[in-house]
Image: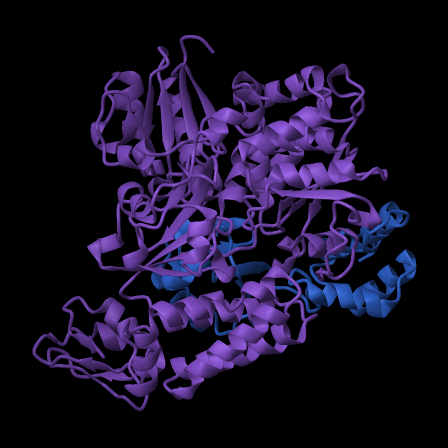
Chain colours: A purple, B blue
Amino acid sequence: MENKWRVVVGLGSCGVASDGRGVYKALEEGIAQRKLSAEMEETGCLGMCYNEVLVDVIDPQGRRTLYKEVTPEKTDRLLDEHLLEGKPITEWIARAEGVVTDDDAFLKDQKRIVLRNCGLISPESIEEYQARDGYQALKRVLKEMTPAQVISEVLDSGLRGRGGAGFPTGLKWRLAAQSDTKPKYFICNADEGDPGAFMDRSVLEGDPHSVIEGMLIGAYAIGAGVGYIYVRAEYPLAVARLKIAIKQAKDQGILGQNILGSNFSFDLKIKEGAGAFVCGEETALIASIEGKRGMPRLRPPFPAVSGLWGKPTNINNVETLANIPWIILNGAGAFASLGTEKSKGSKVFALAGKIKRGGLVEVPMGLSLREIIFDIGGGIKEDREFKAVQLGGPSGGCIPAYLLDTPIDYEAITATGAIMGSGGMVVMDETTCMVDIARFFLNFTQAESCGKCTFCRLGTKRMLEILERICQGEGRIEDLKLLEELSESVKTTSLCGLGQTAPNPVLTTLRYFREEYEAHIIEKRCPARSCRPLLTFTVIEELCTGCGLCAKVCPVEAAKGKKKEPYSIDQTLCTKCGQCLAKCKFEAIRVE
Amino acid sequence: MPDKEQALETVLTEYQKEKGSLIPVLQQAQAIQGYLSKPVMSRIAERLGIYESDVYGVATFYTQFRFTPLGKNIVKVCHGTACHVNGAEGISDSLCRHLKVKEGETTEDGKFTTERVACLGCCSLAPVVMINEETYGRLTSDKVKKILDRY
């Protein structure tokens, strides 16, 4: 590898979706054409999804230049100027030594523990993982620590479950270790179903070995011999890379019998989920692995006592497990020194929605929402007004602007009515209707309810009907009270987290954005201009040039007129699809 | 289609003895055939020694399983939170209008099946559509039409 250029293309799902493979091919061909002495490599997601496709150019002296928004068309200039002439192209740089860019702010406040290798190593190379201390923690655990010591270390670190509920990981392990029935199972929950969260996918695609290592350490700690990774079927790339990683680990004696010469053995299998949000709940996940309908059951007995096939089972989320090797290598103290009193370490957030710099960020706990959204994420697209940030997906809630200084901490977030959840953070601006958002989440939970509890099955359905009526402009003022009553009932009478938290999006929007509900009901108006049945599209005659584009795109021939004269929209035909508004170059379409 | 028969036979033989193998068997049967037909469901029940009603109970619980033939290409429109906020409804509308189908249906020529999915995990590129295994991000109604024309 010495004295060669290295060209690394980011091929996580976001990179691939931005035509990363096309960029890779163009670079490969360009290098061959120019007979350059350069190696092509691929890596996972660096988290800067808003800049995809990212290409890292590492010169023979090891200096890194990260290029953003690379397209196949840009590759010729990149190879000519940087690799042939040795002149980096400053205006395309996202990050490089000695170059100041707007993107520096995105990485400046981050503390990357879970994402320590994402975007830096090839996910399909165990050697690259090992070159960055990979499997060192496992070696230390097997050679120098007893299972009880491992559990104490994790307990002292203060690590809490990153799947969303925040249960102390060390405590969970201790409970599982205390059961003396054999066999024991260790499961990784990679059924990331929260719309708006994608950190688990990025870790699995970008650094699969860190999850496997975390599982091995956990399995050793609780005395488990068999493990499963339960992955969403929607993540084919993650499954493919996990399979490669498992095979590599087996070949090196890191998985299988007598691992690294110890008397600890662990066998790991992948189980592909079949598409059910509720399977993220641990008892439902277990039922699904057993080949049944994924329905939660009463706890106790907890899985630590009676889980898969009635045997003691421990389940941790992907992000939780990726923390483990770092904690073992750096010590519980190093982890616990980050964060707040009750929330230690760092947390990965998936920034999306109306935000300038969307992607994955990992920050120390205790940072405020404002710092994440405005300092790291760069604020709102098109500099519109911030309205709310949605945390915790369908189980979470919308936090308004005046609470932006809330610190990232399990208890502080819960106090707002949202939850920490798995870390999806969807930013909304003035064009997002909060009633519609509540309807959107209810639509999701209603469809994903497993149907076991009556209130969850029917209550969410009735709530959804009410919200749909309000969005249609047929709401009644007493609906709001009814929504609150139903919310309470669904919360208190549901067995699992899905039902217990399903009303949260409704309750938080009612609490913080009640005036939007009232506008829909009393004035039959949608302040965000998003609920179509409440909108009217008309042509502003003074601004219309009669170009006819609106008539061309109108799917129902409601926009009519003669060329060069003002057009008009026939309200009896208009389906309010908004195509004319999107297409008009003269801002001549009025929406109210 | 004897080779499909054979492939299914191999799967059934492989999993027959394994505990909790119903879901992987259904997944592979669907991969072989494109969907789960009545005769296949009966065969799975018989070979795994499970009541047919239980096989249906499991298969209908999970969104992955379908009981009607698929089009040649599957178009999954993401309706996750970020996509919803960034205009996924409009993408769905124009896609369905362009293909002259309703969401979840297959086009008359059998070329496309449209599906609505909860989240593809590419939220920072919203709105997103996945065609077969390829993901397309930062879409507009026009872009969707152009992409469909490639298939």
Identify which residue, A205 or B81, lies in the foreground.
B81
In terms of image quadrants, where is residue A291? bottom right
Residue at the image point whose x is 73% and y is 20% from the top: A253
User: Does residue A255 appear in this view?
Assistant: yes
A121 versus A261 height, above or below: below
Quadrant of image for the N terminus of chain B:
bottom right
Query: In percent of the image, x 77 and y 49: which residue is there?
Result: A307
Pick whichever, A230 or A327, lies toward us.
A327
Most extreme residue toward the top is A2
Answer above or below: position of B98 versus A183.
Answer: below
Q: Is residue A355 left or right of residue A128?
A: left
Among the 4 quarters of the image, the one containing residue A52? top left
Q: Is residue A210 left or right of residue A548?
A: right
- Residue sitting farthest toward the left: A542
A100 and A136: which is toward the camera: A136
In the image: residue B21, left or right of residue A87: right
Instruction: Please tell me whether residue A41 is drawn above or below residue A424 in the rendered image.
Output: above
Question: Can residue A575 be spotted in the picture?
Answer: no
The spot of residue A335 in percent (x, y) is 49, 29
Q: Name the one closer to the observer, A429 or A172.
A: A172
A475 relative position to A495: left or right? left
Tell me where residue A490 appears, x and y as whole percent: 58, 72
Question: Percent from the top left, x then y, of residue A334?
Answer: 48, 25
What residue appears at the point 25 percent right and 33 percent down from the top-left corner? A92
How many numbered tags mark residues here? 0
Outermost residue toward the bottom in this view:
A572
